[in-house]
Image (cartoon, coloured by chain):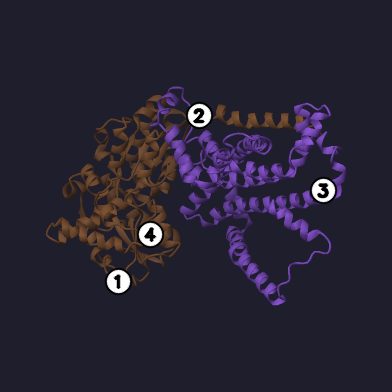
Chain colours: A purple, B brown
Amino acid sequence: MSVNVISKRENSPGYTPVGEPVGIQWLLTGIALLFVGVFLILPLVAIFGQAFAKGTAFYMAAISQPDTLAAIRLTLLTAFIAVPLNMVFGLAAAWAVARFDFRGKNFLITLIDIPFAISPVVSGLMYVLLFGRQSWLGPWLASVDLKIIFAVPGIVLATVLVTFPFIARELIPLMQAQGSEEEEAALVLGANGRQTFWRVTLPNIKWGLLYGVILCNARAMGEFGAVSVVSGHIRGLTNTIPLQVEILYNEYNFTAAFAVASLLALLALVTLAVKSAVEWKSVHLKQETGEIKNGNCNSECK
Amino acid sequence: MSKKIIFGVLLVVLSVVVILPLVSAEQAITLLNVSYDPTRELYQEFNAAFIKYWKGKTGQAVTIQQSHGGAAKQARAVIDGLEADVVTLALAYDIDEIATYKLLPADWQKRLANNSSPYTSTIVFLVRKGNPKKIKDWNDLVKPGISVITPNPKTSGGARWNYLAAWGYALKHNGNSQAKAKEFVTKLFKNVPVLDSGARGSTVTFVERGLGDVLLAWENEAFLAINELGKDKFEIVIPSLSILAEPPVTIVDKVVEKRGTRKIAEAYLQYLYTAEGQEIAAKHYYRPRLKAVAAKYAKQFPKVNLITIDEVFGGWQKAQQTHFSDGGTFDQIYQPQ
């Protein structure tokens, strides 16, 4: 949440940056802007430019082609399953880590980070080794006719694994910083566990949680490596948006590929906008209701 | 606004979204064709034709699904559980590999005519317009300063045909000396800046990213690149010698028995051998087997002096063992730069 800290400082009145000479300030700002322009804005503009290279009608035709629509549906479905699952998991993990002391706590934190550390391709291959026809689970899966890899469940599993640390990682420092005094007070005042959770814990962490959900969702929809390994690339069935972009590109449908890619880029932009809004709102809300909030529940937690 | 209600609604929507497709997907007959990289356009057209043919013959509606990638990678996916009713791969060894896992019988290649290969192809060079580097034959590829694009023989079938064609050329011009041939191919791969995992990836690297002076490509892939991206940009060079590539097809017995699709899978492959199937193959620059269709399209295919894998390398099993298995000659000669 370091971003929040900085923006809060900037917003507070009378804040001045530490005194570098004006020239250096301009130089640094210029370099940063140039970097952003060349590496972020130009490619984005290029994607949209290419996507509309053959006009709006072609764009619409490209993104409403049946295989592409199927890819969009599958991507939405995957995110729709992966994000809530990781939300529950992230909450539970953050709760355990921030509120309790137990042996192996650091080990648990390391475990949560594993999907960040290993290559997504390896994550995908793990599932092939676990659920593939040649694995020890394979014969049993075949006998009950359950398809995991090269089908939708495998894609969902791979996505869940890869996006698994986002929410937990977001919540752990937040909950550790907040401490457990408020929950303890609620319990002393006679609230049961469930009331404490819905009325004290959740309102305190909701912005952090939302922020984690947004990041998790963006990655779930954009994941390529792990999903590519377990997908099987069956057109109209097991291709997600990123895989569909690759297929179109490899079939010389460059404009269509960029049209579909622009959907993902658009999603990224929307995500960024929502993220900024969330940050802005959380900072302002804290400033406005900072004093009243303790003990008094605002309308959203009822 | 109660959280419980929102949560409940979410849960219901979620379960409907998840369960509906699973229920409805099982109704129609589907056939999955797992194929190699450059056949995308061929099977798109062929599938549409077969669906029409089957509907007319039996009244049954069928959906055909396609999956494409490097041939070895695709074979691996089938071995690991991708439920292909039919496989149409770049070379026999990859199907042999599936056979070793008992998904289909070892003598699968005898089940259909012409070594189960309804069409053939060969390896040609694609160069930039005007052939600025004057590349005419295999020995031009080993010259210093020539950049050669080919996929990875470990994952791509086309790449293995490329490699063996080069090896065959070197054998012929060095009195059958394997040592000299190895030296020649080593020099050739020194000129390869990047190995993509499939033939299509290499084509995109060459034509779209503009890398390399020459692309070693399937004949059909070279023609497709020229047709898609303009005759004014590239031209095809036919080397003095190339290899007869037989991309075979077969049904995966374990899968069709489980799914009850044997009859339609067999009909699908048989249809490749009919005049209509052969015509579609020829249109996509695969060399047809049927005499009448071959004669009709003779003009489009240049005459090439072809060697075969059986006479020069003693068949695919042996070639694979010697050249492409772990520690084989390819591993010995290729070092990424």
Please tell me in which quadrant of the rendered image residue B290 appears.
top left
The residue that disc 2 covers is B28
Image height check: is A136 above or below B132? Answer: above
Q: Tell me the crowding category of disc 2: few under 14, some 14 to 19, or many 20 or more residues within 10 angstroms, Cα based.
A: few
Chain letter, disc 2 residue: B
Q: Nearer the viewer, mark 4 or mark 3?
A: 3
Disc sitting over residue B134 in the figure = 1
Disc sitting over residue B194 in the figure = 4
Report the Cα–Cα distance between label 2 and label 1: 54 Å
Chain letter, disc 4 residue: B
Rendering coords of residue B226 (x, y %): 40, 60
Rendering coords of residue B337 (x, y %): 35, 62
The residue that disc 3 covers is A285
Same chain shared by disc 2 and disc 1: yes
Q: Nearer the viewer, mark 4 or mark 1?
A: 4
**Location of the N terminus of chain B (image quadrant):** top right
Chain letter, disc 1 residue: B
Q: Residue at x 45, y 32 (%)?
A: A131
Q: Label 3's element?
A: helix
Please tell me in which quadrant of the rendered image residue A294 appears.
top right
Q: Label 4's element?
A: loop
Same chain shared by disc 3 and disc 2: no
Residue B263 appearing in the image: no
Report the Cα–Cα distance between label 4 and label 3: 54 Å
Dot 2 amino acid type: Ala
Residue A54 appears left or right of B76 = right
